[in-house]
Image: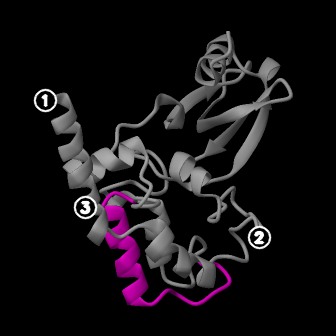
Amino acid sequence: MKSIAVSLFAFSTMLSAVGAVDYVKDVLPIMKERCWKCHSNEESVKGNLALDDFDEVRDFQIGPYNIIRPGNPEESGFLEQLKLPPGDSDFMPRKGDPLPESEIKLIEKWIAEGAIVDAKKPSEKEAAFMAGGKAPVEDEKLKFHTWTNTEGRTIEARFVRFVDNGVTVVMRDGKSYVVPMEKLSGDSQALAKRLAGVE
């Protein structure tokens, strides 16, 4: 019975993938034409956003609390910036022309359908979304947490990694910083270690 259920799940996922809008097939060509000079490892990475790093896009840019929110285009900062008027300081692409309405609609559809990176090779969370239409459950380390320094000042940021006895965090505006561990409060040091899986 279990094998039948697994087969049905895989089959339903496969059917969903046939007509799904995904990043690799549909959105990536737009990014290459419009955003590559400032947001790719091939050219230059600004704002801590490399659109040609699929793992980075899937793990750190897509999520309920990130700039691309699966199933929720209305609250996705990525799409919001593309829709701003060119004179706005947050407009993207900053040095380019506004995207055509057809491309905006395609990106909006992609996010609404779950922001799947590669429908042919979905992650476990993406496969679940494609089969059931529910947004994937977010890993704790991908959420934005409150960090406190030794002076009592706080910021909201997402944990990225340990670097040379410091912790790299990303702010909601996409900017990243390395904070020395000794500058963090005891609770924030414990948080960093827990998220990194360090005892």
Camera-side residue of 111 and 83: 111
CA neighbours of label 2 inside 10 A, class few (<14), some (14 to 19), many (20+) = few
Screen quadrant of the C terminus: top right
- 186 sits left or right of 7 in the view: right
* Residue found farthest to the right: 164
- Residue 95 is covered by the magenta coloring: yes
Identified at 68% across, 15% down, the residue is 198
Q: Nearer the viewer, mark 1 or mark 3?
A: 1
Q: Nearer the viewer, mark 3 or mark 2?
A: 3
Gap in Å between the C-alphas at discs 3 and 2? 32 Å
Q: Residue 104, can we see it?
A: yes
Secondary structure under tag 2 reads loop
Q: Residue 81, can we see it?
A: no
- 172 sits left or right of 41 in the view: left
What residue span does the magenta drawing correspond to? 93-115
In the rendered image, which residue does mark 2 sit on? 42
Gap in Å between the C-alphas at discs 1 and 2? 48 Å
Callout 1 touching callout 2 (CB < 8 Å): no
Identified at 68% across, 52% down, the residue is 175
Q: Name above or below for residue 148 compared with residue 114.
A: above
- 41 sits left or right of 107 in the view: right
- Dot 1 or dot 2: first in sequence order is 1
Location of residue 94 (image quadrant): bottom right
Q: Position of residue 137 (x, y in %)?
A: 35, 37
Secondary structure under tag 1 reads loop
CA neighbours of label 1 inside 10 A, class few (<14), some (14 to 19), many (20+) = few
Q: Position of residue 26 (x, y in %)?
A: 44, 76
Q: Amino acid at mark 3?
A: Ser
Q: Position of residue 163 (x, y in %)?
A: 81, 32
In the rendered image, which residue does mark 1 sit on? 1
- 126 sits left or right of 46 in the view: left
Q: Name above or below for residue 147 compared with residue 25.
A: above
